[in-house]
Image (spheres, grey):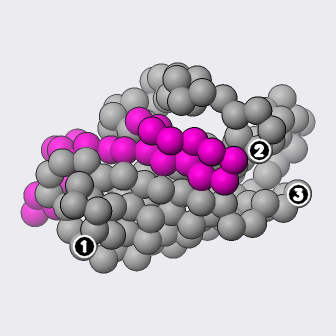
Amino acid sequence: MELPSLEQINSLSKNTLMEHWDIKFTYVSESELWATMPVNNKVKQPYGLLHGGASAALAETVGSTGSALYVDPNKYMVVGINLTAHHLRSATEGLVTAKGKIVHQGRTTHLWDIDIYNDAGKLVSSCRLTNFIKERK
């Protein structure tokens, strides 16, 4: 499988939530995809902490984009169907990094584990995403 470059993957974010929240893909391999997101006012809740929904969106972005690398985009689309997120530590500044690893790559479903870390390398959230691989009509 020939992987697209990070530049190509990041270009898909134009005019999306990923561009608005400054999510950037930083690492890609045959089994992993990583991305960063700044912890700023766009993604904080009223107490000044990283919003759990923003962490969930970052995790789903990594897992869904990762699955999209494995399918023919002309024939299939990737749809997230289940996401669980365990928020373990708060983040108030800096960057968070989501490190996604594919656990199962089936014909119609993919399963991803995505862990989100703060700048100090401490685990902020641990997420699991199931994607449905849907045939385009």
Q: Which residue is mark 3?
A: 107
Residue 34, x across and y down, in percent = 48, 48
Q: Residues within 10 Å of mark 2 (few under 14, many from 20)?
A: some
Q: How many marks can you see? A: 3
Q: Residues within 10 Å of mark 3 (few under 14, many from 20)?
A: few
| Mark 1 → mark 2, Cα distance in angstroms | 32 Å
Q: Quadrant of residue 123?
A: bottom left
Residue 35, x across and y down, in percent = 44, 45
Q: Which residue is mark 2?
A: 70
Residue 31, x across and y down, in percent = 66, 53
Residue 28 sits inside the magenta stretch:
yes
Along the viewing direction, whichever of 87 and 3 lies nearer the viewer: 3
Lateral position of residue 33 relative to residue 90, left or right = right
Q: Is residue 53 visible?
A: no
Q: Which residue is mark 1?
A: 89
Amino acid on which disc 1 is placed: Arg
- Mark 3 residue element: loop
Tell me which segment is drawn in magenta. Answer: 24-49
